[in-house]
Amino acid sequence: MRPSQRRPDQLRAVMITRNFTCHAEGSVLVEFGATRVLCTASVEDTVPPFLRGRGQGWLTAEYGMLPRATHTRSAREAAKGKQSGRTQEIQRLIGRSLRAVVDLSALGERQIVIDCDVLQADGGTRTAAITGACVAVHDAFRKLVTEGKLPYSPLREFVAAVSVGMFQGVPVLDLDYAEDSGCDTDMNVVMTGAGGFVEVQGTAEGATFSRAELNALLELAESGIRRLVEAQKAAIDRN
Amino acid sequence: MRPSQRRPDQLRAVMITRNFTCHAEGSVLVEFGATRVLCTASVEDTVPPFLRGRGQGWLTAEYGMLPRATHTRSAREAAKGKQSGRTQEIQRLIGRSLRAVVDLSALGERQIVIDCDVLQADGGTRTAAITGACVAVHDAFRKLVTEGKLPYSPLREFVAAVSVGMFQGVPVLDLDYAEDSGCDTDMNVVMTGAGGFVEVQGTAEGATFSRAELNALLELAESGIRRLVEAQKAAIDRN
Amino acid sequence: MRPSQRRPDQLRAVMITRNFTCHAEGSVLVEFGATRVLCTASVEDTVPPFLRGRGQGWLTAEYGMLPRATHTRSAREAAKGKQSGRTQEIQRLIGRSLRAVVDLSALGERQIVIDCDVLQADGGTRTAAITGACVAVHDAFRKLVTEGKLPYSPLREFVAAVSVGMFQGVPVLDLDYAEDSGCDTDMNVVMTGAGGFVEVQGTAEGATFSRAELNALLELAESGIRRLVEAQKAAIDRN
Amino acid sequence: MRPSQRRPDQLRAVMITRNFTCHAEGSVLVEFGATRVLCTASVEDTVPPFLRGRGQGWLTAEYGMLPRATHTRSAREAAKGKQSGRTQEIQRLIGRSLRAVVDLSALGERQIVIDCDVLQADGGTRTAAITGACVAVHDAFRKLVTEGKLPYSPLREFVAAVSVGMFQGVPVLDLDYAEDSGCDTDMNVVMTGAGGFVEVQGTAEGATFSRAELNALLELAESGIRRLVEAQKAAIDRN
Amino acid sequence: MRPSQRRPDQLRAVMITRNFTCHAEGSVLVEFGATRVLCTASVEDTVPPFLRGRGQGWLTAEYGMLPRATHTRSAREAAKGKQSGRTQEIQRLIGRSLRAVVDLSALGERQIVIDCDVLQADGGTRTAAITGACVAVHDAFRKLVTEGKLPYSPLREFVAAVSVGMFQGVPVLDLDYAEDSGCDTDMNVVMTGAGGFVEVQGTAEGATFSRAELNALLELAESGIRRLVEAQKAAIDRN
Amino acid sequence: MRPSQRRPDQLRAVMITRNFTCHAEGSVLVEFGATRVLCTASVEDTVPPFLRGRGQGWLTAEYGMLPRATHTRSAREAAKGKQSGRTQEIQRLIGRSLRAVVDLSALGERQIVIDCDVLQADGGTRTAAITGACVAVHDAFRKLVTEGKLPYSPLREFVAAVSVGMFQGVPVLDLDYAEDSGCDTDMNVVMTGAGGFVEVQGTAEGATFSRAELNALLELAESGIRRLVEAQKAAIDRN
């Protein structure tokens, strides 16, 4: 049915590799099937001007795609001299999603900068990025606690994300590139480990969607995110 | 209860003034209370390179805010030399929303460029912009039909948008600036006149939201959009 | 004679609407016939770096044109990433013209930022902008006085502007777009209410102009500006 | 009286050195006292898109200032990534001034690009630039005629420019930097060899100016430009 | 002696992993110790304008560093809106080095775009990039040959690069970050498999260097590059 | 043999004109045959942020080419909005070369900004720029000493640069444009007056080069630079 041969409610193989690179306080390679995103969390000892002297921290995110992460090469944004609207939309979404689960007051006057760079793209790069970034932020906070800079981790809950869509009339989970191109409705859902919604972004492609379809998609997303949070926890428990 | 004294399910006064400026093929001033957006639709006889020679049209949108549309002056994007991430996010949303109700094949090799410029901002500028742009596009198409350039209008349905949010635990409709700042959840919903969803974008601010809250917000939005489509039709019937 | 059927020394209908938008300290819609410019004056409590600590104020201006203010759509400067040479020339002119009538020492360490945005263009946008901006600045100063922040208004005189040109050998006043395109000489004149020249910018288009022609044009401009200053005063007297 | 000890109607020493550099079709170093501008005219065999296939030519100009042409170093525009408003205003003026004396139809589908680069600045760089550029254009046209590419030179007349100003109540000619800083009114005048005005740009600095002052300044400018045109002709006659 | 405990003439462990990502025609992860660079070679069916219709190909390179490839986070070039001088210098070097060993005529009207993106930096990123890019280009050409698009590979020779430097008076090979910071002279050498020099770039840091030192450094570089070319060949022979 | 008719080891005529412009602390026009570069050294009383409060100075360089310094006009970098990779590479080289001979501690918290602007190009602009800049820096330092701001000049040695190349199998010195285009190997060498190497940058064009060729080129460069340093000294001794 699905180009990927998966069942409608089946995630792709999820791999979360911690400490993928050595310099960042948190560094995670997250894989949703063939989609691979390197997520790093960097701790900086200053906050943006609008927060200075207010005793609280900040978290922001940037997103990029290597030029040949895609089927055909896309122009390098650094060479073009600007980030596309799509890039900005995604990095704003990643930042909001992580801020929703971080206690910024407990962080003190520090900034966490998340960088999500897509090494290989096959659909779902933004949902993989949020899922991986959460683990990178967890690791960066653990390091601050270990070094005695924070009494406890400001990460209140896990957060993860997945895409869902209507493919030939059937709600399907975790779309790869081929499925995404053939979908009528495409939705990205971000939820916490406790089951609260952080973001719901549904877009009609071609046909509009009904309340019933929306409900079916949200249910599918909830079940997928539960499994992604388990994968996050398993990765963290591994050492 | 609400800072605006409105009932939870009450829209602000909606005004749709057609032919607000004289050069554009469609030109509409839309007002949602104190929010005022000038929406123009321009017809161009060329399409972007990726569509040339394929016999179909395109529709794209740009969004801007006059520097002093807001409480304190914001820097002019033309002077800063780039559009913010927020601006790009909004103009991409407007474009997708309108393309969802336009038959691009019936348009021929033409491009519709929508410009939504906020003259005065009091919350909900993007939903007002979508609602006004639909009427501007309608008028531009009517002009093409009147001039004999198209046999019928490629506008398949009306489309309108409204914001909803959880304000102190109560779902409320059509947030103004003061309410938006005090909301826990903020959602923008775009629907067609026939009741199909085009876009659903919900964001947790502070606390996450539950399925029950989401459902309540969607119901409120549906009822609001039905009334906005009536306002669009009334404006069009006026001449 | 004139495409507009006006007498050579006849201004277009001038309309000055104060408080056109609600947030700015001064907000004026000025209309010279079909040319409509929204002029706002914003009061900021800081001055540019080169003036800090010197106890005096500053006034600067920015100018923009909505993409479809013109017959055919012009590209949005914010999207192109830079302001054109024409835009910069005009905003520098507006700033100089207003600074000529403002007592910057009496203003204290504050900056007035004028924004002139053309909603609809039919020739003479820069002269309308100067004429409207003067009223907006007046209103912003009155507000500072009313709030007790200034003992008296730093506006020393009114300032207004008009275009004149040689049309088929005849000096004509206040050119609209059609007349401007057909003119041999095009001149913009800025004067104070007391009759002093602030700016005189004459440009030969096609043929050069003589001293006699220059004199005739200046006389026409003087008479036009006298009437514009009356219109400014009448607008202010209206409430 | 004048900081420069010159009589009110005295020009600075004017030097026009042709063939100052070897590659350009016209290359002139023009000196007005300590102000030194290198003006080159380049012939290109294409015209801008808006003129293609119309059988006529175009002329455009660019202006720049070496970073240390001035008393204190100014930032390099190429490093800042944009040209200032002042630069754009000046290069637009140079282009208009030269186009006023060139028969663009007689030029054929060619473009003349004028580059005026200030090696040393002491006031009046734009007027020196126009005066020097005219000779560079003359030389480029002579080359086209000599090579048999044009039957006659499309330069219809000479054009030159000078600044005038009110210095302590006295109209003075050809302001250097010290005088310019101390002037109440500053005017740049561009005229043809035949005595027609091409541009008149007068600006009040501090006090406004009267018709009588304007007249006195224009007379002074006319006499100065007559002498500058003589200097242009003498330079051309030298070989 | 060396911070890395290596002998003066010892390379770091070199790893060359082919097919690291799946979309590019050639995709190689190259590791020089802790330095890791992803090098992809993309085949495009067009050439830059200056080569169109001349029946030959082109090869160009771009270089980037992920923001947290380094000890402390560096700003993302795409977000800053421009590539640094260092980035441009490196990507120009990579392009020249590879063009030196590619028969551009044999390539036909195609362009090879090399992207070298540093995932983790510990000194020598540009030399690792050249060494890895050569294998990526080899693989892309093999693919063109396998698909019957080219009769033989246009890669004439291997090319590899290494850094050498004077560390506390001793010439050392393949500097890591700590050694690079402590070096008096830093030299990057690019050579072909046949032993010809492609680039020699030596820079004095602190003290200048003598001919004798230069000679010692070049000898060291030659022996290192011989071993790197062996590593390239071994990687290619592995499948 | 050589297009220029020079012997293989013959420099072009070298001219060093001091005080070429009047505002800069050091201002030198350097000519290598038809190549003419204006080099100014400006003294600024601040240092870049990364050096503040550390009691030492800095030196940086910028490079530019007038649009018509070349055979055909090149686009103005200020108008294009960015400096090319080539420009950045050259200005970084000039800065490094001069910093190698300046005692930055002895300079105090001051910055020297070197501007090298090419008025006319005929090959070797970067080597001429370094050679001229050294004299400009010398003059700026002499001025600081004369004014009592420094006890002695922080210029420790002279530095000069020359290009060498393999032209039809023969090593030749100081390439002009025609020779540069026909060279197989092109090398730029920067040396101090005491004979130490500062930079060696050799690039294969077409064929690679051998150790023997490299040695011959370096010898030629050494002899050329000795003569350039003599020319620098002679220029300084002239007054």
Image (cartoon, coloured by chain):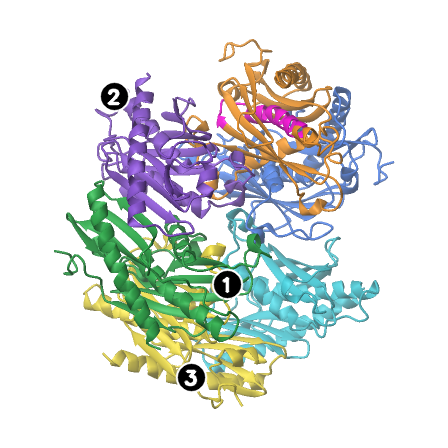
Chain colours: A yellow, B cyan, C blue, D orange, E green, F purple
Q: Is residue B50 left or right of residue A8?
A: right
Identify the image quadrant of the N terminus of chain A: bottom right
Identify the residue at image location x=63%, y=79%.
Answer: A207
Q: Estimate the x, y position of residue E239 in percent, counting from the top left.
A: 35, 78
Say whether mark 1 and mark 3 are on the same chain: no
Q: In the figure, is residue E238 to the left or right of F167? A: left
- The residue singled out by tag 3 in the image is A12
The alpha-carbon separation of the residues under discs 1 and 2 comes to 65 Å
Which chain contains the residue that carries disc 3? A
**If the image is split into quadrants, where does the C terminus of chain A sit?**
bottom left
Residue that carries the numbered disc 1 in the rendered image: E107
Q: Is residue D129 magenta?
A: yes
Q: Residues within 10 Å of mark 1 (few under 14, many from 20)?
A: many
Judging by the rendered image, the residue that carries numbered circle 2 is F148
- Judged from the image, the secondary structure of the residue bearing numbered disc 3 is loop
The three-letter code of the residue at mark 3 reads Arg
Identify the chain of the residue marked 1, using the numbered disc in the image. E
Pick the residue in front: F75 or C220.
F75
Q: Tell me the chain of label 2.
A: F
Relative to C111, does residue E56 appear above or below in the rendering?
below
Image quarter of residue A44: bottom left
Q: Work out how far the residue at label 3 is from the one at label 1, CA to CA, in angstroms.
A: 39 Å
**Cβ atoms at labels 3 and 2 below 8 Å apart:** no
Q: State which region is magenta.
A: D119-142
Task: Specify whether F7 is left or right of C200.
Answer: left
The secondary element bearing badge 1 is classed as: loop
Judged from this view, the residue extending furthest toward the left is E1
Q: Give the prevailing secondary structure in the magenta stretch.
A: helix
Q: Which amino acid does the dot numbered 2 rest on? A: Gly
Q: CA distance from mark 3 to mark 2?
A: 74 Å
Coordinates of residue F184 in the picture (x, y in percent): 41, 47
